[in-house]
Structure formats: C-alpha cells, structure tokens
C-alpha cells in the first residue's frame, strides 16, 4: 500500500503538469485548483504553485508580460507576495523572479514528498536547488551528495522534462530534448516513459558539467565516468521497477 500511495502521488503530480502545460491556467481555474488541492495534499498544492510560476515565466518569455500581469496580481495577492513587484519589474526581471520562486517552492515540495514517502523510495530534497545557475561549485557539491545517496537506490523519484522545466536547464539538455522529438515524434506524447529523467541521471549530468566548467582534473572526471557505468548497469532494473 505505501508503494501504491507513492505512485498515486506521482501520477497526480504528473496530471497537474500535463493539465497546466497543455490547457494553461486562468485566475478562476487557479483558485479552483488551489481549493481542491488544499483538500487533498499540501505537497501537491505547493507543487501546483511552483508549476504555475514556471508556466507563467515561459508564457511571459514568449508572449510578453501584458497578458499575464493581471493573472499574477491575483496570484500574488492569494499568496501574500509583494504585489509591488509587478510594478517594479520588467518582463525579463519578472521571468527571473518567477523562476526563482518556482525553485523555492519545488524544494519545499520535495521536502514534503521525502517526509511522506521517504520510507518507500530514496528521495533527495536538494535536486531542484541544483537548477540555480552559475554557482557551479554549489551545484557540484549538491549533485555529488545526491549521487552518493541515489547510486544504489532501488526506487527514486524523477523530474519532468517538459517545456516549463526546460527553461531551468542548460542548452545541452534542451537540444537533446529537441533532437529526441526529431528522431521519434512519439516522444512528444505525455507519457511517463518519454518525459521524465531520474534524479540519478540528472545528478550525474550536472556533476560532469560542473566539473568541466570548473576545469577539474582528468582523475576527477574518471571517477564520475565510473559512477556512470554503475548507473548504466542498474538502469534496466530501475526501469523495470518503474513500469511494473
């Protein structure tokens, strides 16, 4: 039953991302979502807020800020955020603020998930903090700690590789996602198989990137490659556990 509950929680999280990413959100639907999710689970409520922030940041980057300012004025009032931010920030600054707010809420969400399901799966709580840009040393430290926790885990959580999350990641992952769509258009479908990356895989990728950015020695990179080989040997078993 605990495993079934955790998978149900993950599926509910997945449905939140699909609904907002494909249908978008309005002030009215936002308040309905908040009301219903508050009844269900505090973690899902926090996750919803974070994903709405990412969705709004993405839409602002594409469409400009005018259409979304009214929406976020209502959201800021509901969350008791400083509404003066809407007047003080330009589009690029607003996008940056929303991305940072999303990462903070996602970190809180992960802490709640670990509290409720940490006895079912190995869940690291600092994975979203590694998305904070340019602080390569901090990212390397967190990614290394997460790797050591996850390397021999039997079950772990995953990250959604959706357009909203891609804005937090680097250009290489964005390019890889685009290439995946070109090679196999089926990957554009919203299925667990195609749109998730494990915490372990992400930790290994970020470790390698940070080591390259910080110009670490070949010896240091060789150790990371050893970790990658171990992860690859375990990948099939992990995939079977997720699908079963």
Image (tube, helix red, strand yellow):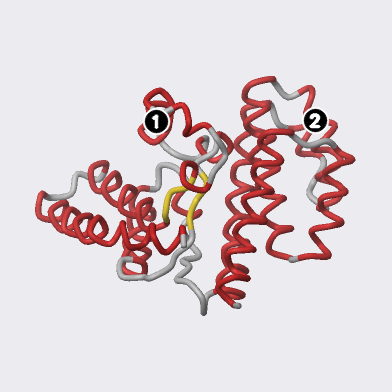
Question: Residue 163: image x %, image y %?
Answer: 55, 34
Query: Which label sits in the foreground, 1 or 2?
Result: 1
- In the image, farthest residue toward the left: 219
Q: Mark on residue 69?
A: 2
Q: Looking at the rendering, which quadrant does residue 72 occupy?
A: top right
Q: Looking at the rendering, which quadrant does residue 75 occupy?
A: top right
Q: Nearer the viewer, residue 139 or 12?
A: 12
The N terminus - image quarter: bottom right
Q: Which residue is mark 1?
A: 180
Q: Residue at x 44, y 64 (%)?
A: 156
Mark 1 burial class by Cα count in 10 Å: few <14, some 14-19, many 20+: some
Q: Residue at x 12, y 54 (%)?
A: 222
Q: Mark on residue 209?
A: none
Q: Nearer the viewer, residue 14 or 210?
A: 14
> Does residue 82 appear left or right of residue 190 in this picture?
right
Q: Nearer the viewer, residue 64 or 195?
A: 195
SS under mark 1: helix
Question: Residue 107: image x %, image y %?
Answer: 57, 59
């Amino acid at each position: 039953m605990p495993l079934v509950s955790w998978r149900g929680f993950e599926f509910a999280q997945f449905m939140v991302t699909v609904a907002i990413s494909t249908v978008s959100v309005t002030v009215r639907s936002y308040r309905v979502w908040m009301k219903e999710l508050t009844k269900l689970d505090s973690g899902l409520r926090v996750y919803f807020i974070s994903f709405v922030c990412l969705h709004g940041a993405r839409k602002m980057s594409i469409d400009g800020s005018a259409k979304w300012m009214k929406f976020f004025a209502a959201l800021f009032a509901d969350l008791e955020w400083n509404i003066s931010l809407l007047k003080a920030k330009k589009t690029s600054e607003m996008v940056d603020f929303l991305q940072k707010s999303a990462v903070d809420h996602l970190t809180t969400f992960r802490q709640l998930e670990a509290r409720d399901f940490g006895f079912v799966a190995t869940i690291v709580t600092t994975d979203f903090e590694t998305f904070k840009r340019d602080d390569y040393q901090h990212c390397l430290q967190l990614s290394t700690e997460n790797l050591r926790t996850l390397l021999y885990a039997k079950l772990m959580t995953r990250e959604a590789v959706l357009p909203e999350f891609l804005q937090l990641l680097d250009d290489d992952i964005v390019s890889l996602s685009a290439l995946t769509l070109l090679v196999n258009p089926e990957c554009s479908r919203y299925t667990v198989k195609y749109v998730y990356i494990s915490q372990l895989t992400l930790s290994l990728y970020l470790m390698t990137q940070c080591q390259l950015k910080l110009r670490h020695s070949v010896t240091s990179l060789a150790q990371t490659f050893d970790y990658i080989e171990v992860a690859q040997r375990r990948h099939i078993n992990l995939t079977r556990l997720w699908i079963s």
